[in-house]
Amino acid sequence: MSTTYQEDISSHVLRRMKEGGFDFARIHPIEFYAIFPDEERARQAAEKFRGESLNTQINAREDGAWHLQLSKLMYATYDGIGDFEQDFQTAIIGLDGEVEGWGVKQEIKRLH
């Protein structure tokens, strides 16, 4: 996926988060996702981020590929997310991994 396309997606998502009242002043666990052809390569990629991530999860998919999710504590900024996503891409390219995107959970404020 091209970097320009990813940047457009990130801009759109961040704008929607702002519209939804997301608290950008707080640090959040931002989740980054990638797909690998096998478990071994997914684990090798996870090892490259040891100490940087809050949480790492590796799961088999129904199609036989392996899904890696890294959660990193950080501010949800365009530059911060873009920089980590670029580092993530660089780290996994030699392992036949493919970045699948990022996400963050947003608290929904209920009206009483």
Image (cartoon, rainbow, N blue to C red):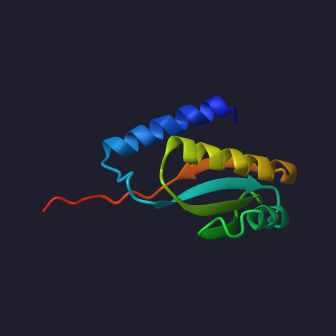
Q: Is residue 59 above or below residue 105?
A: below
Residue at 82% of width from left, 47% of height from top? 93
Residue at the outermost left position: 112
Of 52 and 105, the residue lying toward us: 52
Question: Residue at point 70% right, 36% down?
Answer: 1
Residue extending furthest toward the top: 4
Residue at the image position 63 percent from the left and 66 percent from the top: 53
What is the x, y in percent for residue 70? 63, 62
Residue 34 x/y as whole percent: 69, 53
Give the tally of numbered discs: 0
Is 10 left, or right, of 16 in this rendering? Answer: right
> Which quarter of the figure is the C terminus placed in?
bottom left
Give coordinates of residue 76: x percent, y percent: 48, 50
Q: Position of residue 109 (x, y in %)?
A: 25, 59
Residue drawn at x 82%, y 56% is 37
Is 64 placed above or below 4 here?
A: below
Q: Is residue 13 toward the left or the right of residue 41 in the image?
A: left
